[in-house]
Amino acid sequence: MYLIYIFEYMENKRPDHKLLYYLSKWTKINECDEHTILSSFDTLTIKKKKDILVVGEVCNHIYFIIKGCMRSYYADEKGIEHIFQIRMDNNWISDLESFFSKKPSNYYIEALEETTLLRISYDRLEKLYVEVPALERYFRILFQKAYLNSLKRLNATMWEPATERYADMLKENPEMFQRVPLVYIASYLGITPESLSRIRRQK
Amino acid sequence: MYLIYIFEYMENKRPDHKLLYYLSKWTKINECDEHTILSSFDTLTIKKKKDILVVGEVCNHIYFIIKGCMRSYYADEKGIEHIFQIRMDNNWISDLESFFSKKPSNYYIEALEETTLLRISYDRLEKLYVEVPALERYFRILFQKAYLNSLKRLNATMWEPATERYADMLKENPEMFQRVPLVYIASYLGITPESLSRIRRQK
DNA sequence: TTCATTTCTTAACATAGATCAAGTTGATTG
DNA sequence: CAATCAACTTGATCTATGTTAAGAAATGAA
């Protein structure tokens, strides 16, 4: 059964099925639920440099990136942009704070490449949790993992020098360096582009 | 119904009921489930400076602090301790990475005061998720919030000076300064005790 | 009540990384 | 094809925080 997803995923024939494939990794979902889930999502494609969320808007959706690259960021008082996340194929992106609180967001979410996404609204997701409890399990595990990742990144930012954080990222996320400008990667690492440039020279 | 919890919570007559009170804030649980949940937890009390987890052990439980104060930390190559979390009354503590992966932990979890805890094992929790789906919802929301908090702390660590992080913490967590030595608070803020001391003098 | 230990502070010096300012390279557009 | 703009690099200087070392204050134990 799941083999079909993998196959279609490889063939890229039904891009929306990638989501089911990823769900199936952590939770069991029957065929009936699959249809319920898929029908709750919309597909959209967004051009490079266009936003799916701007400051002041409530973030009403969470997005699953089928193919492409997105960043979320905010601008401080001086207008300097600070990047929160960079996400590529088969990852989720949203402003969860705004999404769950329904308050206006402090963030922008922008495409760094032409990107195809699945999206689901807050209300539709709440309904889905009730209709398909396995989905609540999936998101429990998703947030659990996201939390642990965030703690790891926090620890590295506090206690490891930027050179190491850079080296780790290069090792764990080499593709990002092919697809994302270094300015953004620097911000994601918590340093200035100048510092990143110097770190790269030394290697 | 929930009023009873609040009452008992205030009266401190049945400390284990605090957990139900906190569960009830985010999810609906019927009376039958309440018994199932409570009977899945053990109560334990641990003396100041004693560990409930040491490096190399698998963290088999997650703990809910009824009353007291715990810290989780690791020691780097130089033997310097870095604090991951400080948690007080009515919060959870564990090494989730070890807990979910069942691999040996890199952390210590130690009592900073005499502390009373509820604990549940991995296997028991997995069973509970099936028996009481509302609990899966509770933990989904718990991890969601923990993730957002962690992101906030990450952002502050990257882009705010230590003085601000200190001021924020003093405002949001004044009680911690009464109960936790400054060495630990410094580490939690990502700075040395010397720096914290300097920051405090300037105010 | 005294001694030992832990916690906290202070000062002098060192350093990673920021800031400012200027350039180079490469990509995009009219 | 030139012109503009975005991405990246480099150097000089500055600053927040770390490091080392010492001592004071507070706490706990004998």
Image: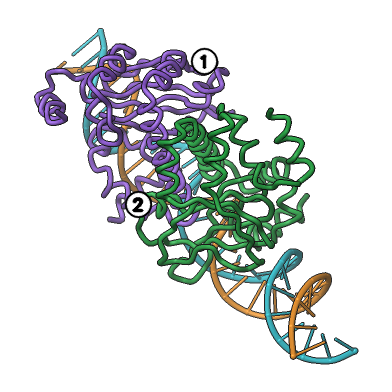
Chain colours: A green, B purple, C orange, D cyan
Task: Write down the chain letter for disc 2.
Answer: A
A97 vs A138: above or below = below
Residue A190 at what x, y percent from top left?
A: 56, 54
Question: What residue appears at the point 50 percent right and 63 percent down from the top-left corner?
Answer: A53
Q: Which mark is residue B58?
A: 1
Tags 2 and 1 touching, CB below 8 Å? no
Between disc 2 and disc 1, the foreground one is: 2
Where's residue B12, x and y in %?
13, 22
- Which quadrant would residue B76 be assigned to in this image? top right
Q: Relative to A87, is A40 on the left or the right?
A: left
**Quadrant (top left/top right/bottom left/bottom right) for the C terminus of chain B:** bottom left
Chain of the residue displaying label 1: B
Image x and y of residue B88, in percent: 29, 30
Tell which residue pokes out farthest to the front in this image: A32
Q: Is residue B185 above or below residue B203?
A: above
Residue type of the residue flagged with mark 1: Val
Q: Type of residue at label 2? A: Ser
Q: Nearer the viewer, residue A66 or B98?
A: A66
Quadrant of the snapshot with the N terminus of chain B = top left
For the question of whether residue A4 can be seen, the reply is yes
- In the picture, the disc for residue A101 is 2
- Left or right of A10 in this view: C12: left
User: Residue B187: in sight, yes or no?
Assistant: no
Q: Secondary structure at mark 2?
A: helix
B100 or A13, which is in the foreground? Answer: A13
In the image: residue A105, left or right of residue A200: left
For image coordinates 49% across by 35% down, the residue present is: A135
Q: Quadrant of residue A200?
A: bottom right
Estimate how packed mark 2 is, as few (under 14), some (14 to 19) or many (20 or more) residues with alpha carbons within 10 Å: few
